[in-house]
């Protein structure tokens, strides 16, 4: 479970992280000063953790935002998304980080060694008082230790910076930088036209990246779909803003595009022997209402009942 649990923004964040995972690497470079090339393998950690409570009860948490980047030196990361700071956020971070560290803890000669992940939070909204870093300090009998939670703020990046630094992960959330002016856009057609022109620029630059091979068509379509999903929620009270931006960005992926994506996924699956990757792609296409269960089951050579069961298992446990 993310810190932004059960919200459309959380769904978008997790969709991007899991379906287009290479997009997270430029964000890591930006926040942690790494130099990942984008070709590193990303391995997601087991997402079920059980937190022990003071009353003796166990609480299950789903943390599908932790992963390992297999660079020259493998490193663990924990990245969360939050609308704005709240008083309990650091507590939840410490809970998650502790459980993530324990997943790979080692006991050698009566010594338990745990490695905490590099942790960061993406703030969708921020004010002057929003911190640039947050710190967890631990007082132990052997001495005091502390570590920082790095902070990234969507509103601090211009559109040119997002593309120049390859921070494409931020595009679906870019609309937050315009949130305070929605009423103005709704009442002024000229200013709404300026907003639409900005999104026309986003659409064109994404298409250029896809044509040049910098991103694949699936990534371009996912960024577009997720941008529309954020827009539907954040501008739910401003119909002209919603419809204006969506008219520029486009709607759902057309069927021939989905077929093209699936066919490439099949080919890659055959080349690499990754049947699980093909099933995950089918699950994603169904969840985004691009394929019906029946069509996806036919592609997987399964009955619709078996396909739905496997999809439920994948959604609950993060694996097919």
Image (cartoon, helix red, strand yellow):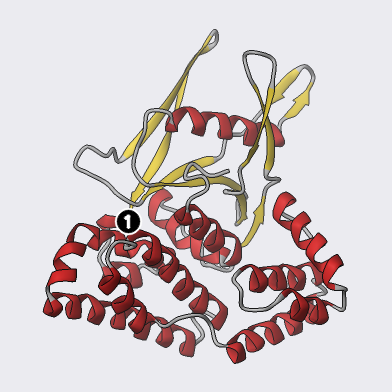
Quadrant including the N terminus = top right
**Camera-side residue of 301 and 262:** 301
Q: Is residue 198 above or below residue 96?
A: below
**Camera-side residue of 290 and 21:** 290
Position of 85 with respect to 269 (left or right) is: left
Query: Is residue 311 visible in this depiction of the protein?
Result: yes
Residue at image location 67% in from the left, 45% down from the top: 47
Position of 103 with respect to 27 (left or right) is: right
Q: How many marks?
A: 1
Tag 1: Cα neighbours inside 10 Å, few (<14), some, or many (≥20)? many
Q: Would you identify the image quadrant in which residue 162 lies?
A: bottom left
Residue at image location 37% in from the left, 61% down from the top: 173
Tell me where residue 229 appears, x and y as whole percent. Answer: 44, 66
Tell me where residue 265 appears, x and y as whole percent. Answer: 70, 80
Q: Is residue 253 above or below residue 134?
A: below
Residue with the most extreme top position:
141
Residue at image location 55% in from the left, 46% down from the top: 77
Q: Is residue 293 above or below residue 125?
A: below
Query: Is residue 40 visible in this depiction of the protein?
Result: no
Residue corresponding to mark 1 = 154
Tell me where residue 113 appears, x and y as whole percent. Answer: 68, 27
Position of 217 with respect to 292 (left or right) is: left
Q: Would you identify the image quadrant in which residue 46 lies?
A: top right
**Camera-side residue of 219 and 28:** 219
- Helix, strand or loop under label 1: helix
**Camera-side residue of 300 and 306:** 306
Quadrant including the C terminus = bottom right
């Amino acid at each position: 479970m993310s810190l932004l649990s059960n919200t459309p923004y959380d769904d978008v964040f997790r969709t991007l992280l899991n379906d287009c995972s290479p997009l997270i690497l430029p964000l890591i470079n930006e926040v942690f000063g790494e130099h990942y090339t984008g070709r590193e393998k990303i391995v997601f950690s087991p997402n079920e953790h059980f937190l022990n409570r003071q009353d003796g009860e166990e609480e299950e948490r789903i943390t599908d935002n932790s992963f390992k980047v297999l660079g020259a030196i493998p490193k663990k990361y924990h990245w969360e998304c939050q609308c704005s700071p709240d008083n309990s956020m650091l507590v939840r971070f410490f809970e998650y980080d502790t459980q993530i560290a324990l997943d790979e803890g080692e006991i050698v000669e009566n010594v338990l060694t745990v490695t905490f992940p590099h942790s960061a939070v993406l703030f969708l909204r921020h004010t002057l008082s929003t911190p640039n870093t947050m710190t967890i300090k631990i007082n132990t009998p052997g001495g005091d230790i502390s570590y920082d939670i790095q902070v990234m703020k969507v509103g601090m990046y211009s559109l040119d910076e997002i593309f120049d630094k390859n921070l494409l992960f931020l595009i679906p959330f870019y609309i937050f930088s315009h949130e305070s002016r929605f009423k103005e856009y709704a009442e002024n057609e000229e200013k709404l036209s300026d907003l639409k022109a900005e999104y026309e620029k986003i659409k064109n630059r994404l298409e250029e990246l896809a044509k040049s091979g910098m991103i694949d068509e699936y990534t371009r379509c996912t960024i577009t779909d997720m941008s529309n999903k954020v827009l539907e929620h954040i501008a739910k009270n401003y119909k002209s803003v919603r419809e204006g931006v969506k008219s520029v960005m486009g709607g759902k992926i057309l069927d021939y595009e989905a077929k093209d994506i699936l066919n490439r996924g099949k080919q890659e699956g055959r080349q690499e022997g990754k049947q699980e990757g093909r099933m995950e792609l089918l699950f994603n296409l169904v969840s985004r209402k691009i394929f019906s269960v029946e069509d996806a089951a036919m592609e997987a050579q399964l009955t619709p009942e078996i396909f739905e069961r496997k999809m439920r298992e994948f959604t609950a446990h993060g694996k097919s």
